[in-house]
Amino acid sequence: MTTALRRAAARISSLLPSRADLAQVRRDPRRDLLAGLTVAIVALPLALGFGVSSGLGAEAGLATAVIAGALAAVFGGSNLQVSGPTGAMTVVLVPIVARYGPAGVLTVGLMAGVLLVGLAVLRAGRYMQYVPAPVVEGFTLGIACVIGLQQLPNALGVTKPAGDRVLVVAWRAVEEFARSPNWTAAGLAVGVAAVMLLGARWRPTVPFSIVAVIAATAVAQLAHLDAAKPIGDLPSGLPMPSLSFLDLGSLGTLLAPAVAVAALAALESLLSASVADAMTVGQRHDPDRELFGQGLANIAAPLFGGVPATGAIARTAVNVRTGASSRLASLVHAAVLALIVFAAAPLVSRIPLAALAGVLLATAIRMVEVGSLRAMAKATRSDALILVLTAVATLALDLVYAVIIGLAVAGTLALRAVAQQARVEQVPLDRGDHSDEEHALLAEHIVAYRIDGPLFFAAAHRFLLELTEVADVRVVILRMSRVSTMDATGALVLKDAVEKLRRRGIVVLASGIRAGQLQVLDSVGALDLLRGDGQEYATTPEAIRAARDHLEAAGVLPPPRPSDTAEEALR
C-alpha cells in the first residue's frame, strides 16, 4: 500500500509546474505581456457570447475565462495554450441546461474536471494521436454549423424558441423573424460579422472583434435602438467560491453528461495544444499535464459560477501569432479579463446580444478551413466519407456520438484496408540441388504458399477459403516468415485450415514461424499441429527436404540413388 501511494504521489508530482516553467516565464516578459493583452481583447466578446449561448449568462463566460484561463495556464502542459469557454463546449452544454438547469451544468463541470485529472494520472493523453484527421475536420465543420445555427435567435432579434435540437430551434427562429422582422438586430449581427471577416483579411493582427462590438454598442446607444436588446446587468466582480449548487442526489444521472463534457474537453484541448506546437519551432506540449491543468480548471470554474472550459484554438492561435513565448501571456489574458469584470461591468452590460451573435457567426465561419476540407475530400473516398459522417452526426446528434461514429467508421475502414493487404500466394518451389526430373516430380506433389501481411480477424476467413481450395496434392508448405501480425482468430483459422487439409490426407509443413507468433499459435492448439512429427522448420529449403523425405517414404518418389546419398554425406 505504501509503495502504491508513493507511486501515485510521484505521478502527481510529475504533473505539477516545474522550475523550467518559471525560467520560461522570465525569458521575454514584454512580448508575453503584449500578447496577453491582445488575446484578452479578442477573448472578451467570445467569453461573453459563449456564456450567453450556454444559457448561464455572460457573467458565466467571463468567470470561466478568468478562473479556467489562469489555472490552465499555470498547471497545463502547453506554454502557449489559452483556455476558456468555447463554442464546441457550448454545443454540449445547451441540452444539459435545458434538462438539468444551471446547477446541473455546474455540477457536470466539476465532475468532468475530476475525470480529467483521473485521465491525466492514468497517462491517457498520448491516445489523442490516434484520432484520424478526417474525424477532427468533420468534427470541426459540424461544430461550426451548430455554433452558427445557435446564434440565429439573437442575430434575428427573436426570443429563443423552445427545444433542444439546434436545427429545429433555428428553423423556428427563422419562422418567427419572418412573421415579425427585427431588422435592427439582424443589421447589427451582419455588420459585426462582416467587419470581423473583412478586417481579418485586411489586417490580421488587429482585433476587429472588439472594434466591431464597440461600434455596434455605440450605435445602439446613440441611436436609442430599442430593438437591440443588451446583455443586461453584470456583477462587478467574481462571486465567492461555493459548493451550494451541488445536487448530490443527481450525481448518478449527471455522470453520462460529465463523461461527455470530459471527453470533449480532452479532445479539444489536446487538439488546440497540437495546433500551437505546429505553429511554433521548439514548443512541445505534455498531453498528460494538459489534461491535468484542464481538470483543475474545470474543478475550480464551477465554484465561481463558470461553465466547463477547454483549450481554445482561436485564442491560442492569436496568442502564438502575437509573439507569446511562455505561460505568462495566458496569465495576463486572464488578469486583464478579471480587471474588466471588476472595472467595466456596467459598460459591458450594454453590449447588444445581436453584436455578440455576429461575433460568434464570424467565429463559426472562420473555423471552417476550406483548404483542409478540400484536401480531405480529395485524399480518398474513405476520408471523405468519415469527414461527412462526423460532420452530419455532430449536427444531428451530439459531439460525443459524432466522435464515436467517426472513430468507429474510420477504424472499420482502416481494418478493411489492412485486411486487403493479407495475401495467400502460391509460389514456385526452390530448385535447390534437385535435377530437372526430380524438381518436376516435387512440383507435381508439393505446393508452397506464402502468407503475406496480417493474419487477424478481419482477414482470416478469406485466408481459410483460399487455402482450403488447394488442389489435390500430397504436401502443403506454409511459408510464414512474412506474416506481420497474428491474433487468436487468425491462429484458429489457420488451425482449422490445417485440420481440413489433413483430413484430406494432405501433410502440412510450416516454415519461418516468428518467435512472437508462437504463443498465440500454442494458445489455440495450432502449434501442435504444425509441429507434429517435427513439422516446423526454420527455412523453406528444410521444409522441402522434409516433404521429399515424406514422399519417398510413401513411395511417391523413388529413393535416392546410393551415389546421391554418398554425395550428401560428404557435404
Image (tube, rainbow, N blue to C red):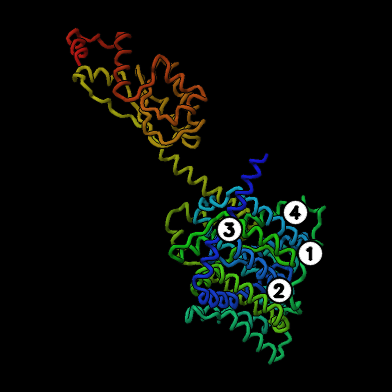
Q: Is residue 304 visible?
A: yes
Q: Answer whether labels 4 and 3 touch (C-beta < 8 Å).
A: no
Q: Answer whether labels 2 and 4 touch (C-beta < 8 Å).
A: no
Q: The residue tagged with tag 1: helix, strand or loop?
A: loop
- Give the quadrant of residue 7: top right
Quarter of the image where the C terminus is located: top left
Spatial CA distance of label 2 from label 3 is 26 Å
Foreground disc of the pair 2, 3: 3
Residue 96 placed where, x, y %? Answer: 73, 60
Q: Is residue 319 above or below residue 536?
A: below
Q: The residue tagged with tag 4: helix, strand or loop?
A: helix
| Residue corresponding to mark 1 | 242
| Residue corresponding to mark 4 | 254
Spatial CA distance of label 1 from label 4 is 19 Å
| Residue corresponding to mark 2 | 58
Q: Which amino acid, by three-letter code, is at mark 4? A: Leu
Q: Answer whether labels 1 and 2 touch (C-beta < 8 Å).
A: no
Does residue 409 appear left or right of residue 96 in this picture? left
Foreground disc of the pair 1, 2: 1
Q: Nearer the viewer, residue 244 or 360?
A: 244
Does residue 128 appear left or right of residue 162 in this picture? left
Foreground disc of the pair 4, 3: 3
Badge 1 or badge 4: first in the primary sequence: 1
Badge 1 or badge 3: first in the primary sequence: 1
Does residue 505 appear left or right of residue 248 in this picture? left
| Residue corresponding to mark 3 | 290
Q: Nearer the viewer, residue 376 or 292?
A: 292
Badge 2 or badge 3: first in the primary sequence: 2
Q: Nearer the viewer, residue 499 or 116?
A: 116
Classed neighbour count for the residue bearing mark 4: other residues with Cα under 10 Å, few (<14), some (14–19), many (≥20): some
